[in-house]
Amino acid sequence: MINRKSEYRKISIFGSTGSIGKSAINVIQNQINNSIKFQVQTLVAQNNYKLLAKQALELKPEFVVIAEEKYYQDLKSELSTLKNCQIMSGKDAVLEVARIKCDLMISAIVGIAGMLPTYLALEAGSNIALANKEAIVCAGDFLLNIAKKNNLKIFPIDSEHNAIFQIFEQENLSQISEIILTASGGPFFNSTKNFRDITLAEALKHPKWQMGNKISIDSATMMNKGLEMIEAYYFFPISKNNIKIIVHPQSIIHGIVNYNDGASLAMMSNPDMCVPISYVLNYPNRASINHQKLDLTKIGQLEFYEVDNKKFPAINLCRNALEQEGSALVALNCANEIAVEKFLKSEIRFDEIYMIVEKTLQKIPQKKLNSIAEILDFNQQVCEVASNIKT
Ligand code: NDP
């Protein structure tokens, strides 16, 4: 368990070249007078060997892994001057370094590819700072159980869950009536454009957050918020019906906890992922980081709206899958990953993302999944079905 006095933390960053990985490195490199010092133990990326090498030269980790084997030689030559660092490549190497214990593994690979490394890190005794929501959507019970067994923590990095984590009074659990996750609404909240005609460039242009491609599309469909509802169910001991979603276009309030005495606690910050990342890196301390001060007088107005479930069917698809739990969640996530990938390659229209998810869920029967290996096998089967869905 992480303790308050710890002055020195070994951090591993899985997905270091992505949006979350870069923000995490920004926090690590730019903390001001912080009592906790960080030593980066491992950096992992998939393709971007140039940025990975730059990060490694700056942070001097013990292990650097590029998942795509064809970049091994390039990475090695970029790092020819780096001492005491093991450079590795391939999927197995990603798993190998996940098994090396650290104080905190930042789980920021995108998609279900991040699930097994996260599980292995927990098995090895590492606490987790979880950005990779697909892992908890697909394997929530398995991750929570292994964390509990090994007396480890899984901290939420996702801004909404991180917000709730900061204001959720475990000691007053019976007095919590509901939690509310806010959604920016994405680029199409106010748009009257037919979803058939939405272009890739429009869908990638998020109004508030700078994120990787997959989560940007998930935000545009609002699938992201549905996945977050499932994530919240695993993170917080609260019934499914008491997890609510509201649209808040300014993205200043990230989460709200309503208590039975009429109090509603809300956590606010500018939309900047460095804020939740700093919180989990330093937990239970708080640190000083470079940030833009929140000035509500400049923002002026905070708005809140109901989600339009007709326009954005994703949340109901997620609610239905959450009702069933287990394999339905794996199928939901997998179908969405396949559909988003196809949309990113311009193989399908924007509205067809929902169709692929819905039709896949109709085709795939529920199945009891007893291990992480069974989840991965099942995911493979769903991938085949989802890839062949005709819209
Ligand atoms: P990005 O696409 O920006 O980054 C993904 C990272 O994972 C990259 O470093 C990528 O390497 C690496 N990667 C991808 N696949 C593999 C693989 N098979 N093996 C090893 N490394 C891999 O994504 P984001 O940072 O935006 O998101 C990461 C996760 O965090 C997602 O699950 C997302 O939902 C979640 N999240 C993101 C937020 C954000 O603000 N971005 C907010 C909240 C949650 P390479 O660059 O070389 O391809």
Image (spheres, rainbow, N blue to C red):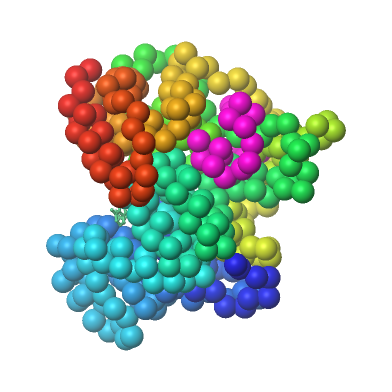
Which corner quadrant holds the C terminus? top left
Res 264 visible: no
Q: Residue at x 34, y 69 (%)?
A: 97
- Work out whether residue 311 or residue 313 is closer to the camera in this orientation and state it: 313
Q: Residue at x 72, y 48 (%)?
A: 170
Res 267 visible: yes
- The answer to which quarter of the image holds residue 74 is bottom left
Report whether 201 appears left or right of 149: left
Question: Residue 25, relative to residue 86: is it above or below?
Answer: above
Q: How many marks?
A: 0
Which corner quadrant holds the N terminus? bottom right
- The answer to which quarter of the image holds residue 235 is top right
The x and y percentages for residue 141 are: 48, 45
Q: Residue at x 50, y 52 (%)?
A: 145
Q: Residue at x 45, y 27 (%)?
A: 324
- The answer to which quarter of the image holds residue 5 is bottom right
- Work out whether residue 289 or residue 267 is closer to the camera in this orientation and state it: 267
Question: Residue 331, relative to residue 66: is it above or below?
Answer: above
Q: Is residue 225 magenta?
A: no
The x and y percentages for residue 258 are: 74, 34
Q: Is residue 239 magenta?
A: yes
- Work out whether residue 290 or residue 117 is closer to the camera in this orientation and state it: 117
The x and y percentages for residue 51 are: 32, 64
Q: Which residues are magenta?
A: 230-254
